[in-house]
Amino acid sequence: MAEEYRIRLVTLGGGGTGKSSIVKRFLFNSFCDKHRPTVEDLYCREFDLEAMTLKVDILDTAGDFQFPAMRRLSIATAHAFLLVYSVDSAQSFSIVKDCFQEIRDQKSDYQEVPIVVVGNKCDLAEERRQVTKEDAAEWLFCELPRLRAKILECSAKDNTNIKDIFRAFLTLSKLPLPAEGLRRRSSAHAAGGSSSTNRLQCPPEGSASAAGEDTGSPLHHQRSFKPRSRSLIRRTSKKVQKMKDAAAAAHHGTTANIDDCCIS
């Protein structure tokens, strides 16, 4: 049996920086220009890493800090963090620093936790940039203690360096990266019906399979099937038997009370 490794990746950062866009670009290869504030979204996926099965839970958190209890729980249960800022917002970079301080306060082993710091929206014109990669790197590698961390810039809109972000987590987690790249398990494999895998080509967002529902799989039909209660079957059998006994008794000229065999 293949070895299994589970990791819980939590995204943190300010609102409007593109945390959800990065996750959705990676999982569904989709992008939406409209900003919709996230409360909390959880995505669960399985990938094949040679002889190992990697199970990834990606928790996409809110960026408005209105749910402090949820944030504390998210940080406490995380195995890795994706800290996202926008290159055109110095304030969003300050929020990333605050997020790191939260991690530092809540996790005593924070220096061993994989952390990837990402500057999103690198597709914007240079005159709009407020945070350079050099400034972010200086903070991460010079001002902070030694960490298991990496810094990248990306564009969820242009699909630039998105897969590199998640490859970085494999490297920081010291997990093997197959030569052919990260491969996601097919729904048939997850259901136990096949050992085939497919490359990271997810269905369009909003479809049944993208939402985690496989309406055509055998497991879906098994979940919708509700077996009859055994007690009901026994009571029905007793009723049938008593009715047969009553009919036989009536045939021989005797009486029988069959009211007690009714199922309420």
Image (cartoon, helix red, strand yellow):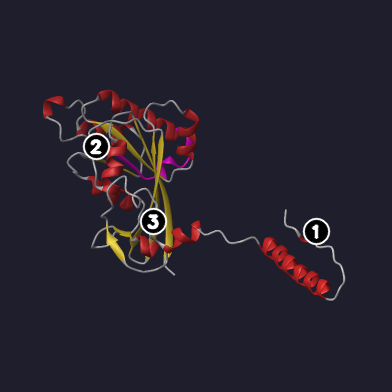
Indicate which disc residue 259 carries. Answer: 1
Residue 47 appears at what percent x and percent y?
A: 34, 58
Q: Quadrant of the N terminus?
A: bottom left
Residue 248 highlighted magenta (yes or no) = no
Outermost residue on the right side: it is 254
Q: Which residue is mark 3?
A: 214
Q: Which residues are the magenta region?
A: 105-117
Q: Amino acid at mark 1?
A: Asp
Q: Examine the image and state in which quarter residue 162 appears.
A: top left
Residue 201 appears at what percent x and percent y?
A: 25, 55
Q: How many marks?
A: 3
Q: Which residue is mark 2?
A: 32
Decide: few, some or many residues near mark 2? Use Cα within 10 Å; few <14, some 14-19, many ≥20: few
Please tell me whether mark 1 sits on a helix, a strand or a loop.
helix
Please tell me whether mark 2 sits on a helix, a strand or a loop.
loop
Q: Amino acid at mark 3?
A: Asp
User: Residue at horizontal 52%, vertical 59%?
Assistant: 225
Q: Closer to the camera, 29 or 204? A: 204
Please tell me whether mark 3 sits on a helix, a strand or a loop.
loop
Q: Earlier in the sequence, mark 2 or mark 1?
A: 2
Q: Quick check: 155 above or below 247?
A: above
Q: Is 105 on the left-hand or right-hand side of 196? A: right
| Residue 72 can be seen in this image | yes
The nearer-to-camera label among 2 and 3 is 3
Q: Are marks 2 and 1 in contact (CB under 8 Å)?
A: no
